[in-house]
Amino acid sequence: MPVITPNLWFDGQAEQAAEFYCSLFPNSQVTNVSYYGEAGPGPAGTVVTVDFVLDGRPFTAINGGPQFSFDEAISFAINCADQAEADDYWKRLTDGGEESQCGWLKDRFGLSWQVIPAGVEDLLNDPDPERARRATTAMLAMKRLDLAAMRAAADGD
């Protein structure tokens, strides 16, 4: 099977972004850095691409320039083992970034993430439609997902 590699476009911050993302996730590392040569189009010796692996998944960061930027149409979901892990990722990814809603955020490079503690999907898909509705209503009022608050809402507390 072919390997599908997400390519992320940056304006001069590809190496810093790759290093930041590798610092967040286990089993991650920068695997290659390529530089512009004399032919350009960027200044010779500056970083053009950075290949890196996030927990076994390949990515490439490209210093493509200011023509394009990230928006919420693309995001990466982090399905966390528990609330503590979700809170840790939330804290580190929002450092220099911004909180959004319903577990979404933008990191310091403008890339969107969804940080989801285990158990959220079960609440949102509860077989009791009223419990699911109350959990969803609670989630829609949140920035960082709070599983305990969503459970309390689902239970009618």
Image (cartoon, rainbow, N blue to C red):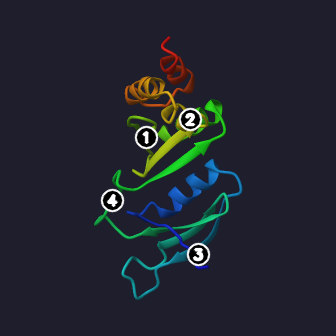
Instruction: Give how far across and how far down residue 106 sits, in percent.
Output: 41, 45
Image depth: mark 3 or mark 4 in front: 3
User: Real-space Cα distance between discs 1 and 4?
Assistant: 17 Å
**Residue 106 drawn above or below residue 36:** above
Q: Quadrant of the N terminus?
A: bottom right
Residue type at tag 3 = Val
Residue at which label 1 appears: 104
Residue at which label 4 appears: 69
Q: Which of disc 2 and disc 4 is earlier in sequence?
A: 4
Check contact, mark 3 vs mark 4: CB within 8 A.
no
Check contact, mark 2 vs mark 1: CB within 8 A.
no
Q: Which of disc 1 and disc 3 is earlier in sequence?
A: 3
Residue at which label 2 appears: 122
Residue at the top extreme, as displayed:
157
**In the foreground, 114 or 147:** 147
Q: Secondary structure at mark 2?
A: helix
Mark 4 packing: few (<14 Cα in 10 Å), some, or many (20+)? some
Q: Secondary structure at mark 3?
A: loop
Looking at the rendering, which quadrant does residue 3 occupy?
bottom right
Q: Residue at x 58, y 32 (%)?
A: 87
Image depth: mark 3 or mark 2 in front: 2
**Residue 110 drawn above or below residue 10:** above
Residue type at tag 2 = Asp
Q: Residue at x 33, y 53 (%)?
A: 71
Query: Which numbered marker is on residue 3?
Result: 3
Check contact, mark 4 vs mark 2: CB within 8 A.
no
User: Real-space Cα distance between discs 4 and 2?
Assistant: 34 Å
Instruction: Give how far across and how far down residue 125 sits, in percent.
Output: 50, 36
Image depth: mark 1 or mark 4 in front: 1
Q: Residue at x 55, y 27 (%)?
A: 147
